[in-house]
Image (cartoon, rainbow, N blue to C red):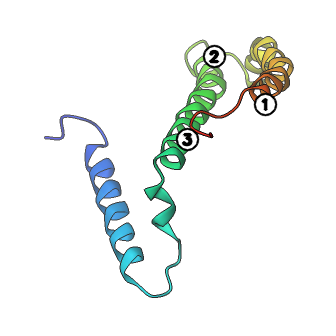
Amino acid sequence: MDRIPGAHALHSGALSLALFVVIELEVDTPLLDVRVFRSWIFTKALVLVTVGVRGTERGAVLPAAVHAGCHGLTALNSGITLLPQAMAMALTMPVAGKLYDLSAPVGSS
């Protein structure tokens, strides 16, 4: 009767994470210092990086799986088909990094 596939896994993961944070805040020698998440700038940056990485992974892995699974291409043909995307990313990422370095982070005054 699970309406959303994987909803139980998401709920148990969120509950486990919340329990971990509560325990880590209470013990004398924590495994992980979770107090850094009190900084809103750090938390927001971490969420944005996570979303960006997940988007990049979906853009790189999902098309290859669709080409191989749905269109019946071999792994080699799927890779050759996606090669222009990979080359474009390889060429534009250093430029984007240099442009990002020119701007100051928001909230750093």
Q: Foreground residue, 44 or 77?
A: 44
**Disc sitting over residue 67 in the figure:** 2
Which residue is situated farthest in the front direction here?
109
Measure the alpha-carbon separation of dots 2 and 3. 33 Å
| Residue 84 percent coordinates (x, y) | 81, 11
Q: Which residue is mark 3?
A: 45
Closer to the chain start, of discs 1 and 2, is 2
Which residue is rendered at x = 69% and y = 16% of the image? 73
Disc 1 marks a residue whose amino acid type is: Asp
Closer to the chain start, of discs 1 and 3, is 3
Occupied quadrant, residue 55: top right
Question: Viewer-nearest of labels 1 and 3?
Answer: 1
Disc 3 marks a residue whose amino acid type is: Ala
Which residue is rendered at x = 58% and y = 25% of the image? 62
Q: Residues within 10 Å of mark 2 (few under 14, many from 20)?
A: some
Occupied quadrant, residue 96: top right
Above or below, 51 relative to 88: below
Closer to the chain start, of discs 2 and 3, is 3
| Residue 33 percent coordinates (x, y) | 52, 71
Q: Which residue is mark 1?
A: 101
